[in-house]
Image (tube, rainbow, N blue to C red):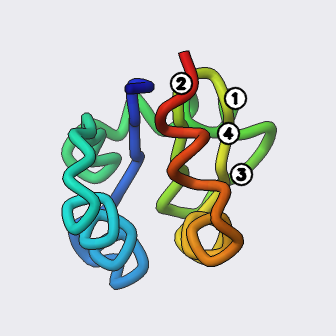
Amino acid sequence: MQKVEIYTSPLCGYCHAAKRLLKQKGVPFSEVDILAEPNRKAEMIKRANGGRTVPQIFVGETHVGGCDDLYALDRAGKLDPLLAAS
């Protein structure tokens, strides 16, 4: 299974929704809280090609995008294969 990383804020409803979907699928993920670690925000923006909003979700080296993008991948049946890719 691919490594999943998600940049979040505890105040963000979309972050909670994205994490909920990952948890429902049994997908382990690492989380970077940019409020608790503000120095990591520049890292997130660079990795997300300028994306400044949270969540920013990465599956392996693939930048998925935000919560809506994650759910769209799941609805299209493309999330599980992405997670399983080696």
Q: Split into 4 quadrants, where in the image is the N terminus?
A: top left
Q: CA distance from mark 3 to mark 2?
A: 17 Å
Q: Tell me which amino acid carries mark 1.
A: Lys
Q: Which mark is residue 86?
A: none
Q: Secondary structure at mark 1?
A: helix
Q: Nearer the viewer, residue 20 or 43?
A: 20
- Residue that numbered label 1 is attached to: 46
Question: Secondary structure under badge 2?
Answer: loop
Which residue is label 3 attached to? 51
- Inspect the image, locate mark 4, and give the three-letter code of the amino acid beneath it: His
Q: Earlier in the sequence, mark 1 or mark 2?
A: 1
Q: Which residue is mark 4?
A: 63
Distance, label 1 to label 3, CA atoms, is 8 Å
The three-letter code of the residue at mark 3 reads Gly
From the image, tell me which residue sits under label 2: 60
Q: Secondary structure at mark 3?
A: loop
